[in-house]
Image (cartoon, rainbow, N blue to C red):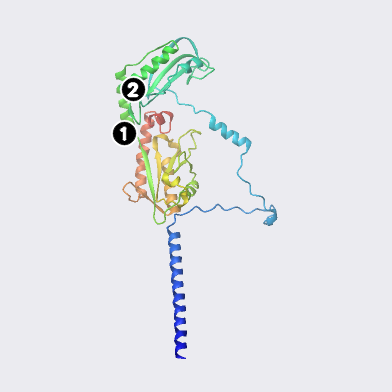
Amino acid sequence: MGERGGNLSMSTLQISLAIIGGLLLAIVVAHSAWSARKNLPMQPTPDPVAPAIDPTGGDLPLDTQPERLEPGFDTDSSLDALTALTVPEKKPGLDALIDVIAPIGVDSVVSGEAALAAMPGSRRAGSKPFAVEGLSPASGAWETPAAGQRYSAFQAGVQLANRTGALNQIEFSEFVMKAQAFADAIDGQPEFPDMMDEVARARELDNFASAHDAQLGFTLRAKHTAWSPGYVQQNAAKLGFVAGSVPGRMVLPASQSGPHAPPVLGLSFDTQAAMAEDPEQTALRELTLSLDVPQVLRAEQPFERMCEAAIALAASMDGVIIDDQGQPIRPEAMEAIHADLEQLYNTLEERDMPAGSALGRRLFS
C-alpha cells in the first residue's frame, strides 16, 4: 500500500508540474504575441461599406442588396480629365523685370515651322531658362512659336536669377550665342543689351530674392506607437492630400491656379518605407509638412492650412509637432511666423512679384 500510494503521489505531482509548465508556456506565448501586436505600426482602418437603403425607409433584404460596383470610368468625365492632362501648360512670357531681353528684327514674316527649326536644342543658358518668343500679327501678342503660325518679329530672353544664383558673364555669353544662332537661321538682326549692366541687374535681383525666400517645414513625430505608410496616407487623405509623383510624398492641390499650379502643401515620409515589399510592416516615426511660400498664392492661405493640417494630424495620429531641435512648436510660435509671412507677402507684391504669380514662381525656382 505504501509503495502504491507513493507512486500515485508521484504521478499527481508530475501531472501538476506538466499543467503548470503548460500554463507558463501559454502565458509566454500570449505575452510575446501581445508584445508583437503592441510594437506593430498603426494600420489604416478599412473603409466601411454603407448599407443598402430602401426608398420606403426600411433595410433591403440580403438577397436584394445591390451588387458592389468596381471602380470604372465614365466616358465623358474621363475624356475631360484626359483633355485636361494633355493640354500643354501655357508658359509665362518673358518679362523685363526678371529677364534679359534681346529684340530680333526680321525683314519679312517668318513661319512657325521655320522658327521651330531654328530653335536651339537646349532651352537653358547655364542654369538659367532661355526662351524665344514671336510676335503674332494676327493677335498682336508675343507667344512661344508654334507650327501653323506666322511671326513679324522675335525676342530672345534669359532669366536674370533663380534659386541657383544670379546670371553670370559666362551664362550671358551662352545666351548671346544661342540667340545669335537663332537669328542667323531666320535671317534676323538681334540687338543685345550691355552685358555688365545686365549682370549687375541680375545680382541686385538675386540679392532681393535671397533675402525674401521662404521654405517652411513642420515635423510631426509619433508620441508612442509608430505609423505604417498606409495609416499616414489614410489620415492625410481625410484632409485633402493626394499621392505625389514620388513614393513617400503627398500633396495638397491648389484650388485657385488651374491644373498646372504647384501644390499648396507637401507631406513627405521615408521613401524606402513607402517602397518596401510590405510597406504596412514598416514603422514610421516622423513625417514632414512643407510649404514653398513664393510658389503659392496668398489667397490660398497656405500657412493657415499648414498649421491646421499639422494640428489635425497630430490629434488623429497621436503625434507632436516639433521644430528642427526636436522641441514642440507652440501656438504662439506659429503666430509669430504668420506675422513675418504677411510682411513677406506685402514686400513681394510691392515688387510686382506676388507669391504664386508667374513671375514669382519663375524667380523662386
Vertical comparison of 47 with 101: above or below = below
**Percent position of residue 285, x then y:** 39, 51
Vertical comparison of 291 with 361: above or below = below
Q: Residue 3, located in which quarter of the rendered image?
A: bottom left
Horizontal arrangement in the rendering, residue 7 relative to residue 164 (left or right): right
**Percent position of residue 175, x then y:** 37, 20
* N-term mark: 2 or 1: 2
Query: How far apart in space, not on screen, are marks 2 and 1 (Cα)?
Result: 23 Å
Looking at the rendered structure, the kind of residue marked 1 is: Ala
Number of numbered discs present? 2
The image quadrant where one finds the C terminus is: top left
**Residue drawn 38% across the image and 22% down it:** 158
* Extreme residue in the front direction: 3
Q: Can residue 155 be seen in this view?
A: yes
Q: Residue 226, located in which quarter of the rendered image?
A: bottom left
**Percent position of residue 42, x then y:** 46, 54
* Extreme residue in the bottom direction: 1
**Front residue of 105 and 56:** 105
**Front residue of 131 and 216:** 131
Q: Residues within 10 Å of mark 2 (few under 14, many from 20)?
A: some
- Tell me the residue that label 2 is attached to: 171
Helix, strand or loop at label 1? It is: helix
Vertical comparison of 239 with 15: above or below = above
Looking at the rendered structure, the kind of residue marked 2 is: Glu
Horizontal arrangement in the rendering, residue 70 relative to residue 106 (left or right): right
**Front residue of 227 and 329:** 227
- Tell me the residue that label 1 is attached to: 211
Helix, strand or loop at label 2? It is: helix
